[in-house]
Image (cartoon, grey):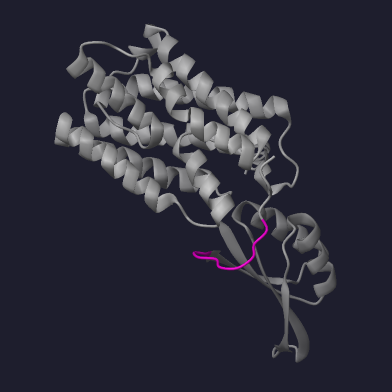
Amino acid sequence: MPDKKSALFNILRRETSSKPAPPVMRVSLIVLGALLMAFNLNTFVNAGGLIPGGFTGLTLLIQEICQRYGGFTIPFSVVLYALNAVPAVICFRFIGKRFALYSCLMIILCGIFTDWMPSMFIDFLQLHDSLLSAVFGGLLNAVSIALCLYADGTSGGTDFIAIFISEKYKRDAWNYIFAGNCVILGLAAWLFALDKALYSIIFQFTTTYALGALYRGYQQKTLLIITSKPDEVYALIRDETHHDATAFTGLGYYQKKDRVMLYSVVGAGQANTLIAAIRRIDPAAFINILKTEVLSGRFYRKAKD
């Protein structure tokens, strides 16, 4: 990989470190993410008549209902701020103050940019193909959310609710969020048009799939490391990732020597950096990397700051 690309890749993977990114970088990522999200809402989403998931989609749905059936228009920012007010307060009190503040900055900027973005940018991309709007809008939405996540924040809304339930009650809330999105799409299909709701499903699927590839902070990898220096390798895993390891002893049949295999689960974003460091300690180490689908038990996660 070229040096410039490597530098950018390292910047975008700061979740591998136990230290948060510098405030200037976090604010820059939030601003860029808000700009991209506002641009996407005013171009691809607007052109395709799409309803994104979460509070953003609910905001657009409320705007459309007021305009069609009430004959008046409510600014995007007003509805977005009202919907996020209570979840933001809960997140500030129970999750993390800086995390909530950066997320609120994203919400505020997104609302302002969406309402006040110059028309020359909006007119630049007005597609007449709903499928193209759904696919490329979903991709751009994933990029904007990923930038916010790399800044240790969220785009607000249902993310606040899901993280709060996960942190406080140790339960996965994404099924409930998905059900809520289905209700929003059902209302959109009933009130407006079925095809727009179906295209919105493509938009949300594209966002989910692309976000999984762009951001791996919530994914894990299982490492099986056969090494002749288990103490040094374990110390590296412990110090660099704050995760533990389990040692298994066995016999290497090729050389007829005793071997130790370390079993450890780490964050997906930490795996490549950790493997490179292990190679420096033991160049002959044999490492098998497995994708962890489901993890049950104690697993260290960096606290929200």
Q: Main secondary structure of the magenta part?
A: loop
Q: Is residue 185 above or below residue 77?
A: below
Task: Tell me residue 230's x, y (percent).
Answer: 80, 74
231 lies left or right of 182: right
Task: Tell me residue 256's x, y (percent).
Answer: 75, 92
* Magenta span: 292-300
33 lies left or right of 185: right
- Is residue 127 among the parts visible in the rendering? no
Compare residues 128 and 93 and report the one nearer the observer: 93
Q: Is residue 210 a member of the stretch shown in magenta?
A: no
Quarter of the C terminus within the rendering: top right
Q: Determine which quarter of the picture holds residue 23.
A: top right
Compare residues 36 and 8 and report the one nearer the observer: 36
Compare residues 96 and 17 and report the one nearer the observer: 96
Task: Tell me residue 218's x, y (percent).
Answer: 56, 52
Q: Is residue 152 above or below residue 282?
A: above
Q: Is residue 303 above or below residue 171?
A: above
